Image: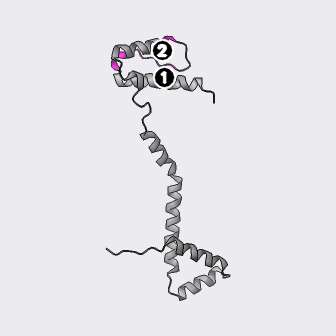
Amino acid sequence: MASSKKPSRDAIAALLRFSADYDQTAEEAEKELRAAGVDVDGFQARLKARLAKQADEDRLAWMTSARAELAKPRHGDAGKYRAMDRTALVANLKARQKSPAQAQAFFHKLDEISDDDLRTLLADLDELDDDEEEPT
């Protein structure tokens, strides 16, 4: 496997500083570089590919942060509902259904919903209640 030696960022920065002070047209620079044996077309192709890759990474950066956000637990351990048995969970949900609130959930077949889903539902309702209380 061939190893490629990458120039240090300091060398590139020095080159950029030097070239900024150098009064030369693009055509003159290209001619001089070709005369020095530099593959200008190859360099430009690699540069365009790198810029396109960076543009894609920048465009899709939101996905990385969204995936990280989705990986976080939404309700932690569902807090106070973790220790409740099914009877207590159903009773808590039924009590919430009777209370006046903007967000409610109604299930006619509570025997078909799992305990974990009940816990998550109650935690979601708690979160919605918290959102209602906080002014935006």
Residue 132 occupies quadrant: top right
User: In the displayed image of the protein, which residue is found farthest to the left?
Assistant: 1
The percent coordinates of residue 23 (x first, y second) are 68, 82
Q: Is residue 13 left or right of residue 75?
A: right
Q: Is residue 106 above or below residue 74?
A: above
Q: Nearer the viewer, residue 8 or 87?
A: 8
Report whether residue 50 is seen: yes
Q: Quadrant of residue 74?
A: top left
Q: Position of residue 71 (x, y in %)?
A: 42, 40
- Tell me if residue 108 is in the magenta stretch: yes
Give x and y (percent) for residue 122: 44, 22
Majority secondary structure of magenta residues: loop
Which colour style is shown? one colour
Secondary structure category for the residue under label 1:
helix
Is the N terminus in the top left, top right, bottom left or bottom right quadrant?
bottom left
Badge 2 crowding class, 10 Å Cα cut-off, few under 14, some 14 to 19, many 20 or more, is some
Q: Position of residue 111 (x, y in %)?
A: 33, 16
Indicate which disc residue 125 carries.
Answer: 1
Distance in Å between CA atoms under marks 1 and 2: 9 Å
Vertical placement of residue 92 versus 23, above or below: above
Q: Which residues are magenta?
A: 97-112
**What residue is disc 2 on?**
96
> How many numbered circles are shown?
2
Q: Amino acid at mark 1?
A: Leu
Q: Residue at x 51, y 57 (%)?
A: 56
* Residue drawn 46% across the image and 11% down it: 95
Q: Which sits earlier in the primary sequence, circle 1 or circle 2?
A: 2
- The crowd level at tag 1 (other Cα within 10 Å; few <14, some 14-19, many 20+) is some
Q: From this view, report whether residue 111 is shown above or below residue 18.
A: above
